[in-house]
Amino acid sequence: MDFDDARTDAPDDATAARLGRILVLAGFIPFAALALWLYGIAPDHPWRQGTIILLTGYGAVVLSFLGGIRWGLALRRHDGEADLILGIVPPLVGWIAIVVPAPLNFVLLAVAFAAQGAWDSLTLTSGWFRRIRIRMTLLVVAALVVAFVATS
C-alpha cells in the first residue's frame, strides 16, 4: 500500500483527512516545543522542573486520548472487547509516568507511544488516520527521546 496515496480514501474522507492532519500536527507542537526547550535550557534553569511536568502531563493526556479513540472504535463496532480492555492501558501508563522521575518518565512515555502507534498501525482501517498515526508516533517518540537526553 502506498502510504502517500490520498486517492485510497473515499471522497467524503478527504475533508476529514485534511482537518485530521492539521489537528494532529497542531497537537505535536507542545511535544516539539517543550522537548526542544528542555534540551536547550541549563540544568539549573528555574523553569526546568516545570517544563518536565508540562511535557509529562501533556504526554499522559495524549495517551489517554489515544486510549479513548480505541474505546470509540470498539463501541462503534459492537465487537471490540479487546479494544475496551486494552484501551484503558494508555491512560494508566500516562498516569504512572506522571509520578516516575525524569528521565525514566520519558522512557515510559516513549515506549507507550511506540506500542500504541504499532497497535494502531496494525489494526486501524482508515488509511489516512493510520498513515498519520505512524508519522506522529515517530515524531512524538523522537521528541520524548530528546527530553530523555536533556534530563539524563
Image: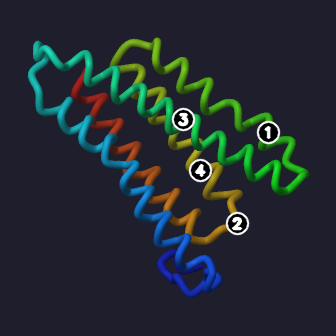
**Label 2, on which residue?**
125
Q: Which amino acid does label 1 sit on?
A: Leu
Identity of the residue drawn at 65% across and 68% down:
126
Give the x, y percent position of residue 98: 46, 18
Which tag is nearer the camera, tag 3 or tag 1?
1
- From the viewer's side, name the closer residue of 96 and 110: 96
Quarter of the picture containing the C terminus is top left
Is 64 left, or right, of 23 in this rendering?
Answer: right
Q: In this view, does 93 lie above or below 75?
A: above
Disc 1 to disc 4, C-alpha distance = 17 Å
Label 3 Cα crowd, 10 Å radius (few <14 / some 14-19 / many 20+)? many
Q: Sequence-wise, which precedes: disc 1 or disc 2?
A: 1
Name the disc covering residue 84, or none: 1
Give the x, y percent position of residue 136: 44, 54
Disc 2 to disc 3, C-alpha distance = 21 Å
Q: Do the residues labelled 1 and 2 touch (CB within 8 Å)?
A: no
Name the disc covering residue 14, or none: none
